[in-house]
Image (cartoon, helix red, strand yellow):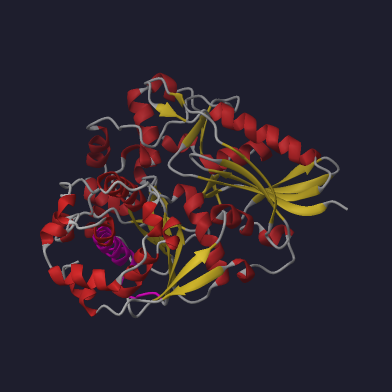
Amino acid sequence: MNEPVIAIYDIGRTNKKLLLYDREYQVVYQDQVSLPEIKDEDGYPCEDVNNVSQWVKKSFKAIKRNKKFAIRALNVSAYGASFVHLDERGRPATPLYNYLKPYPEGLAEQLYEQYGGETTFVRQTASPRMGMLNSGLQLYWLKHCKPEMYNTIWRSLHLPQYFAYLIHGKFFNEITSLGCHTALWDFTRDRSHDWVYAEKIDATLPPVVATHSYEVVSNYNSEMLCGVGIHDSSASLVPYLLAFEESFMLLSTGTWSITLNPFNEEPLTEEELKKDCLQYINYRGTPVKASRIFMGHEHDYQEARLAEYFNKTPEYHRSIVLDEVLLSKLLSNGSLDQRFYPQTMQHTGPLPNFSGPLTDLQQFASYEEAYHQLMLDLVGMQVISLKLAIGRKPPQKIFISGGFCANQLFMRLLATHFPDICFYTTQLDNASALGAALVMHRHWNRDQPITHLFQSQEIKPLAISSLSTYLPVSI
């Protein structure tokens, strides 16, 4: 008998995956590719949407023919801030523009001025100014800068909904994609923003449906339920929301360190927006306070500096053992000159992208000493970012996932800053793909999810009282 499974396409910037989950949400099949980029008409690197589409279609056809599995449902998790613009034949009418592509100077200001000014606009849309990362501004750019191309667009789908469309053939808009710093959604009125209607952008946007919606698709002699897709950040939060009832935050670490607080529904303040704090809408349709910091990228950059200066291998930092005596020595020193980010650590304005002057490494006696100082400073930055998302009522738990879970120095320093909150590392492979599967759970699976999937370990704080005075009181 064929094994009942749910198929999930997990489309990341680097890796594209097809995973099959059984009824207990164990991966029983995986296909993965990494495809080369191309360039758009302006010469800027971008995804080859046609190439990715061909892989999706080909891999889906192959798995349907695999007699070992019976596909009962399918869904898509994909990165946000990216539109696929389709012509009347349902084919891509433009390149899949890179969300890092520079945005024309003055164009966003033009939009903001028409609709209440930048402060009002970004507060209403919970979308700090981020250029192409505000996907709605991509449509505004096409309309005003490339009208001939814009006039060929019939429908615009965010990436998760586009790849779902390739399977079920229908056009949908979905709230986790629409409500993720797109500048399209008015959080103060729970509908599309006025500019969307005034600019007639709404003509290209399909109707909004719930995240757990699906279409019935013929699958040879049976039927399959195909979901409408979900934004990957929102998808990664789903397993935690289903498994835990008490309040918590999720800190996802990697190139970006992203804090998600689904229990903070306080409206964004002007100060929070200036510090790159924003709101998502989760799969249940409620706001999630979020903050982010470019931490993994900065760690890798500084770690490479240390390795070169102290003549160590690039992986040497993995062997560093937490040294409380060394930490106490660095903390008792109290010199701002020894910090990696002396200006930033005293700064109470927007969190910068670590662009300050480089610290002189000659002042450190060893790689170990320099790395402990680096982690003191990076954790300090992370504390600032976490506090932005916490709000007035601290959560009971903070779960940490991703690459920094293996860094005991980082983990224990962070826990020490919040002695009244329990910190846990979590091991949850393919969290965004699992989340995309779980929003379809009730439609195809009678088994009960999912706490057995979590492997968590509590992080013990350090007994270093002086750490609490290391950061400015006015954070």
Is residue 176 shown left or right of residue 420? right
The residue sitting at 48% across, 28% down in the picture is 37
Q: Nearer the viewer, residue 149 or 399?
A: 399
Residue 321, horizontal then vertical, whole percent: 37, 65
The residue sitting at 48% across, 77% down in the picture is 246
The residue sitting at 35% across, 72% down in the picture is 415
Check the image and report above or below for 369 versus 169: below
Q: What secondary structure characterizes most of the magenta part?
A: helix
Residue 463, horizontal then vertical, whole percent: 30, 80
Q: Is residue 103 visible?
A: yes
Is residue 216 shown left or right of residue 255? right
Magenta residues, as a range? 373-395
Q: Is residue 284 visible?
A: no
Residue 216, horizontal then vertical, whole percent: 73, 46
Outermost residue toward the right in this view: 1
Q: How many marks?
A: 0
Q: Nearer the viewer, residue 50 or 306?
A: 306
Is residue 180 shown left or right of residue 376? right
Q: Nearer the viewer, residue 191 or 183?
A: 183
Check the image and report above or below for 437 versus 384: above
Residue 295, horizontal then vertical, whole percent: 33, 53
Q: Indicate whether residue 379 is drawn in magenta.
A: yes
Task: Name the quarter where the C terminus is drawn.
Answer: bottom left
The residue sitting at 69% across, 32% down in the picture is 58
Q: Nearer the viewer, residue 285 or 410?
A: 410
Residue 450 figure quarter: bottom right
Q: Indicate whether residue 437 is drawn in magenta.
A: no
